[in-house]
């Protein structure tokens, strides 16, 4: 798996413009298509971009980038140089929010990433 640094991602406008900041693992695993007999024609918009989430790899939390596409998604990289305390905090989420070992970004981690990647 590719490892990337914040400074390299910051310079990649194609990446930063396509981050799905409010797209969480829980949302990722929700069914995207309604049952056609109950709600025909109500198909949600295609979701494409990059989801960031925390995963525990070899007993250590890490920040992961998943390329989310309409019909196929895959993990593409791990982000290095993220403060470990922010990652550990994210790995403590409630079982309702973390799905399949994927932990959503906390507000603190999201704010830190926006500052580092977008200068906000």
Image (tube, rainbow, N blue to C red):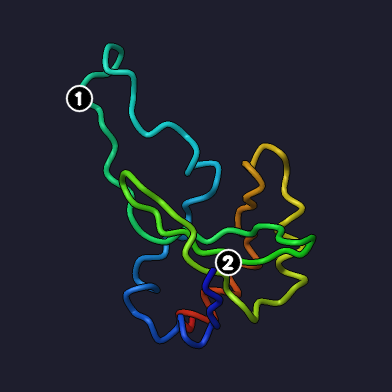
Task: Tell me which label, 1 or 2, sits earlier in the chain.
Answer: 1
Image location (x, y in percent) of residue 61: 72, 63
Q: Separation of disc 1 and disc 2 at Cα?
A: 35 Å
Task: Look at mark 2 in the image and give the residue it sits on.
Answer: 110
Q: Nearer the viewer, residue 10 or 119?
A: 10
34 vs 104: above or below: above
Left or right of 103? Residue 113 is left
Dividing the picture into quadrants, the one containing residue 80 is bottom right
Left or right of 43? Residue 76 is right
Badge 2: few (under 14), some or many (20 or more) residues near its Cα, within 10 Å? some
Dividing the picture into quadrants, the one containing residue 50 is bottom left
Q: Which mark is residue 41?
A: 1
Q: Residue at x 27, y 42 (%)?
A: 45
67 vs 114: above or below: above
Q: Nearer the viewer, residue 26 or 5?
A: 5
Left or right of 33? Residue 96 is right
Q: Residue at x 33, y 49 (%)?
A: 47
Q: Secondary structure at mark 1?
A: loop
Q: Residue at x 52, y 61 (%)?
A: 52
Left or right of 60? Residue 74 is left
């Amino acid at each position: 798996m590719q490892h990337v640094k914040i400074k390299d991602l910051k310079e990649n406008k194609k990446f930063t413009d396509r981050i799905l900041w409010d797209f969480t693992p829980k949302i990722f695993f929700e069914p995207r298509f309604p049952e056609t007999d109950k709600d025909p024609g109500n198909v949600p918009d295609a979701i494409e971009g990059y989801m960031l989430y925390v995963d525990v790899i070899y007993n250590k939390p890490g920040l992961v980038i998943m390329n989310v596409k309409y019909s196929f998604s895959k993990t593409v990289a791990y982000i290095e140089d993220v403060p470990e305390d922010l990652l550990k905090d994210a790995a403590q989420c409630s079982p309702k929010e973390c799905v399949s070992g994927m932990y959503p970004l906390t507000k603190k981690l999201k704010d830190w990433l926006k500052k580092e990647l977008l200068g906000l």
